[in-house]
Amino acid sequence: MSIAIAYIPSGYTPEQKKIMIEGTKKGCMEGMNLPAQFAYVMVHEISPENMDEMTYGMKCLFIYTTHGKRPQGKNIIAKAFDDACAAAFGDEKGQTYVIFKEHHDENVGDNGFLRPFSPGYANFNPGTALGSEKK
């Protein structure tokens, strides 16, 4: 599972945001070897008056995911986010940053259960190719 939250300046069109979201989701799926139903992407828009001039053009992606992701998979995601921002925003792409926030299963609640206590979770294994060392 991955939850990717992009922080971007406000003012982009729905079409531009869709391009960025789809490219980022594809990168998360490839980089972590996840099916679409376990790769989530959302956007937070920040008004220009809430940014300094250094951060105004910046696009940041924070990815929350389970512990143990491999650098190769993370690199796929960083490249996908940069490419998605270039495709969506063109000359306004700015700097892109990706920050991974990994956590252990005992630090995640899912539908009312902490992961280790979630019915059926012990049987879940979406794959391990580039995404993680083990599930």
Image (tube, rainbow, N blue to C red):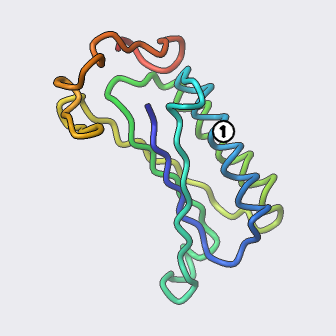
Measured from the top left, where is residue 61 in percent x and y?
52, 52
Task: Return the x and y of residue 55 as percentages of the image width and height.
Answer: 54, 73
Q: The C terminus appears in which quarter of the rendering?
A: top left
Tell me which corner region of the image, top left, top right, bottom left or bottom right, holds residue 48.
bottom right
Residue 94: horizontal and vertical position, in percent? 68, 64
| Within-10-Å neighbours for mark 1: few <14, some 14–19, many 20+ | some
Q: Is residue 46 left or right of residue 112?
A: right
**Residue pushed farthest bottom?**
49
User: What residue is shown with label 1?
Assistant: 79
Residue at the image position 54 percent from the left and 25 percent from the top: 73
Q: Is residue 92 above or below residue 19?
A: below
For the point 70% across and 60% down, the residue is 17
The quarter in which the N terminus is drawn is top left
Kind of residue at disc 1:
Lys
Give the residue at x 23% y 28%: 115
SS type, badge 1 = helix
Give above or below for 116 relative to 23.
Answer: above
What residue is rendered at 47% in x and 12% in y? 128
Query: In the displayed structure, would residue 85 be above or below residue 39?
Result: below
Task: Measuring from the top left, give residue 3's x and y in whole percent.
Answer: 45, 43
Could you tell me how many numbered marks the image carries?
Answer: 1
